[in-house]
C-alpha cells in the first residue's frame, strides 16, 4: 500500500479548491449591482457588515478566540479614515483605506497580548473593555472627533480619482463589494495555508498543537492582527461611503450584532459571516417596514428562535449542502481511494 | 553526584526536579537520567507522579525547583513548542488529536512546522514538495492511514516531529487486545537512534520493551536499574509489583 507525493498534495489541496457553490455565490453577489438598483444603500451596509463579520470569523471560527470588542477596530479605523479625509492628509480613498487597515492592524497587534491571556470569559471582558475605552476616548476628545455630534465635514475624494460617491450609492456599493471580495480572497488564502492549518489545530487542541511544535501564542497574535486589520477596513468603508462617523461605531451593540450575524451564518467556513450578514440585514429591513415602531421586538424574537431552535438545524442544512458539494467535487476530481475515509485493507 | 553518573552523558536528564501544587508535593528531587538510544521505562503506582514528571519534561508544567537538560542543554524555561524543535516529542495517555483535521492534514501540519514553513500564510497547503514527500515517508513507515487507528495516529504525530527523544505516555492505555500487537510492533519498530522514555502501567509491555526501568513512588524516584534488578528488588515488590503480579 503506497501513496505518492502527488496524491498527498492533491488531497491536501482539495479544501482550497473553489467549489461551484462559491463561484455561484460571487457571481450572484456581483450580479446584484444590476439586479437590485434601488437597494444600493442596504446592499452597501450588508457588504460592510459581511466584511466586519469575516474579520470576526477569522479569529472565532479559525482560532477559537471569542471577542465582544471588534467594534474597537471598526470604530478606530472609522475615525482614522474620517480624520485623514477631513484634514486632507490622505485624499485618495483606496490609499486611505489601506492605511486605515494597516494602522488598525497595528492596534490589534498591541491589544492582542491582553486578549491572549485567560479563558473565553476573560477574552469577552477584555475585548469589551478595550472597545469601551476607545469609545470614551473618542467622546472625551470631542475637539478632534466631534464628540456626540459625530465627525462633521468629511469630504471624500473620488475613488482612484475617477469614481465619485453618488447619491444613489451605486459607486459606493461597487467599491464596498470589490473591497469585500479582495479581503475575502486574502482571508481564504490565509485559512488554506499551513498557517491556517496550524490555527485550526490550535482551535481543536491547543495542548497538542504546542506538543508538536506550533508556537501557539505567536500564531494567535498574528491572526488577531489580521482580523483587526480587516475590521478596520470595514470601519473605514463605512466612514468613506457615508462621509460621516459617529460614536456609535464603538457601541457594544455593534460587536454584539456581529456575534449574532456569525451565529446565524455559522463559523469556520468563511461564508458564515457573509450569509449571516445578508440574512440579518434583510430581516432587519423587512421587519422595520412591517412594524416601524416595534421592529426590535420581532428581531429579538427571531434571534432567540434562531439561536435556541434553528441554529443546530441551520448548521445541519449547511452541512448537508456542503457535503453534497464536496461529494460533487470529489466525483469531478480524480479519485483518491488510498486517502479517503474508507480504509481499504490493502497491504 | 559523580557516583550516580552513568558511563555516557545522558540525552535527557533531570536534576533535583520538584513540583509543588499548593501543599502537595507531586514530584520531589527527581534525578532521572536517560541515556542516548535507551529504551527506558518510568513506572509507578497510581498517583506516583508519572504524568507530572512527563508534563514537567515537556514544558506543560513549570517545575518549582530543579533543572531539565536535553543533550546537556538547560531547557527548564523553554516553552513546549521550543522543546519540540530541539528534538523532544511526546504522545498522550488520552488521545490528543485534532478532530477538525484529517490524519493526513495532521501529519502535514507537524511536518510543515518542523521544516519551518508552518507560518507560511500565502502558500496553499499541499504545495511544498519537501512536506508532501516527507508525509509519504511517514505514512509508509507507520502504516497509519490504511488502518485509521487513532492510537497509531497519536504516535505518528509525535513521530512526525522526528524526535531524538520520544516520550510515550501509556501508549497501550485503552487499546483493545486485538490491536495491541500492532501497536507494540509500531513501538518496537522505532529507529534505534531514537531515545524512548516509556511511561506505562502495563507490566508485560514494560518488561518486554525496557532496558532500564525507573520506579516513581510518591513523587520521588524509588529504584532505578535494569529490568531484572527492578523485578527482584524487594522494596519494589512491596510497594508496586507485588500488587500487580498477584493480580
Image: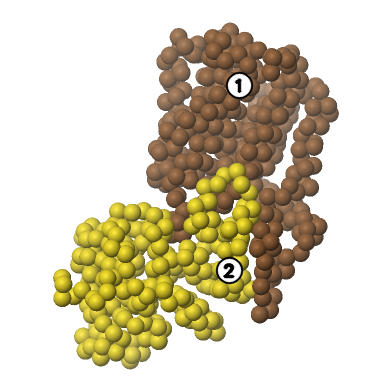
Chain colours: A brown, B yellow
Q: Are marks 1 and 2 on the same chain?
A: no
| Residue in the foreground of this view, choosing between A106 and A245 | A106
**Residue that mark 2 sits on:** B137
Residue A19 percent across, percent down from the top left: 75, 49
The label on residue A95 is: 1
The label on residue A155 is: none
**Residue depicted at x 58% and y 26%:** A98
Q: Nearer the viewer, mark 1 or mark 2?
A: 2
Above-or-below relation of A146 to A222:
above
**Residue depicted at x 33% and y 54%:** B78
Q: Is residue A347 left or right of residue B96?
A: right
Residue at the outermost right position: A35
- Quadrant for the N terminus of chain A, please: bottom right
Residue A108 percent across, percent down from the top left: 47, 33
Q: Quadrant of residue A8?
A: bottom right
Q: Quadrant of residue B206?
A: bottom left
| Residue in the foreground of this view, choosing between B145 and A10 | A10
Residue B150 percent across, percent down from the top left: 55, 70
**Measured Cα–Cα span from mark 1 to mark 2:** 48 Å
Q: Is residue B17 left or right of residue A104?
A: left
Above-or-below relation of B235 to B133:
below
Chain containing mark 1? A
Q: Quadrant of residue B243?
A: bottom left
**Residue depicted at x 57% and y 44%:** B121
Amino acid at each position: 500500500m503506497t501513496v505518492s507525493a502527488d496524491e498527498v498534495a492533491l488531497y491536501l489541496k482539495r479544501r482550497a479548491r473553489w467549489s461551484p457553490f462559491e463561484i455561484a455565490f460571487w457571481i450572484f453577489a456581483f450580479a446584484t449591482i444590476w439586479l437590485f438598483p434601488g437597494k444600493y444603500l442596504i446592499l452597501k451596509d450588508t457588504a460592510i457588515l459581511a466584511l466586519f463579520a469575516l474579520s470576526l470569523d477569522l479569529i472565532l471560527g479559525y482560532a477559537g478566540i471569542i471577542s465582544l470588542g471588534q467594534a474597537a477596530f471598526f470604530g478606530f479605523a472609522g475615525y482614522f479614515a474620517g480624520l485623514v479625509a477631513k484634514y486632507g492628509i490622505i485624499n485618495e480613498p483606496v490609499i486611505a483605506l489601506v492605511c486605515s487597515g494597516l494602522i488598525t492592524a497595528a492596534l490589534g497587534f498591541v491589544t492582542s497580548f491582553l486578549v491572549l491571556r485567560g479563558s473565553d470569559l476573560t477574552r469577552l471582558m477584555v475585548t469589551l473593555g478595550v472597545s469601551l475605552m476607545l469609545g470614551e476616548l473618542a467622546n472625551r476628545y470631542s475637539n478632534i472627533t466631534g464628540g456626540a455630534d459625530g465627525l462633521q465635514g468629511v469630504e471624500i475624494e473620488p475613488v482612484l480619482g475617477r469614481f465619485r460617491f453618488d447619491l444613489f450609492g451605486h459607486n459606493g456599493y461597487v467599491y464596498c463589494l470589490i473591497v469585500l471580495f479582495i479581503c475575502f480572497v486574502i482571508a481564504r488564502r490565509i485559512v488554506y495555508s499551513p498557517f491556517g492549518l496550524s490555527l485550526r489545530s490550535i482551535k481543536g487542541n491547543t495542548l497538542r498543537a504546542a506538543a508538536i511544535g506550533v508556537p501557539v501564542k505567536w500564531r494567535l497574535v498574528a491572526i488577531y492582527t489580521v482580523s483587526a486589520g480587516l475590521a478596520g477596513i470595514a470601519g473605514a468603508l463605512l466612514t468613506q461611503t457615508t462621509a460621516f462617523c459617529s460614536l456609535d461605531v464603538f457601541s457594544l451593540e455593534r460587536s454584539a450584532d456581529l456575534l449574532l450575524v456569525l451565529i446565524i451564518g455559522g463559523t469556520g467556513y468563511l461564508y458564515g459571516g457573509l450569509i449571516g450578514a445578508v440574512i440579518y440585514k434583510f430581516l432587519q429591513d423587512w421587519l422595520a417596514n412591517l412594524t416601524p415602531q416595534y421592529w426590535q421586538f420581532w428581531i429579538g424574537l427571531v434571534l432567540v428562535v434562531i439561536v435556541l431552535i434553528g441554529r443546530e438545524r441551520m448548521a445541519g442544512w449547511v452541512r448537508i449542502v456542503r457535503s453534497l458539494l464536496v461529494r460533487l467535487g470529489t466525483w469531478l476530481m480524480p479519485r483518491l481511494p488510498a486517502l479517503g475515509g474508507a480504509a481499504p485493507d490493502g497491504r | 553526584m559523580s557516583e550516580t553518573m552513568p558511563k555516557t552523558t545522558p540525552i535527557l536528564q533531570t536534576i533535583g526536579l520538584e513540583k509543588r501544587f499548593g501543599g502537595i508535593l507531586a514530584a520531589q528531587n527527581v534525578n532521572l537520567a536517560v541515556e542516548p538510544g535507551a529504551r527506558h521505562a518510568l513506572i509507578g503506582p497510581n498517583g506516583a507522579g508519572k504524568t507530572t514528571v512527563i508534563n514537567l519534561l515537556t514544558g506543560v508544567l513549570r517545575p518549582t525547583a530543579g533543572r531539565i537538560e536535553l543533550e546537556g542543554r538547560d531547557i527548564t524555561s523553554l516553552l513546549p513548542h521550543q522543546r519540540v524543535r530541539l528534538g523532544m516529542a511526546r504522545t498522550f495517555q488520552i488521545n490528543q488529536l485534532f478532530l477538525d483535521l484529517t490524519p493526513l492534514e495532521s501529519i502535514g501540519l507537524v511536518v510543515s512546522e518542523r521544516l519551518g514553513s508552518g507560518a507560511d500564510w500565502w502558500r496553499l497547503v499541499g504545495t511544498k514538495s519537501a512536506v508532501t514527500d516527507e508525509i509519504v515517508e511517514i505514512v509508509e513507515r507507520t502504516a497509519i492511514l490504511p488502518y485509521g487507528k487513532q492510537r497509531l495516529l497519536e504516535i505518528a504525530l509525535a513521530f512526525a516531529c522526528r524526535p531524538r527523544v520520544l516520550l510515550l505516555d501509556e501508549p497501550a492505555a485503552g487499546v483493545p487486545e486485538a490491536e495491541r500487537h500492532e501497536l507494540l510492533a509500531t513501538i518496537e519498530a522505532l529507529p534505534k537512534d531514537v531515545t524512548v522514555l516509556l511511561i506505562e502501567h502495563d507490566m508485560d509491555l514494560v518488561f518486554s520493551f525496557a532496558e532500564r526501568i525507573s520506579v516513581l513512588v510518591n513523587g520521588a524516584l524509588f529504584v532505578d536499574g535494569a529490568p531484572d534488578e527492578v523485578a527482584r528488588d524487594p522494596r519494589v515488590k512491596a510497594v508496586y509489583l507485588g500488587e500487580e503480579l498477584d493480580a
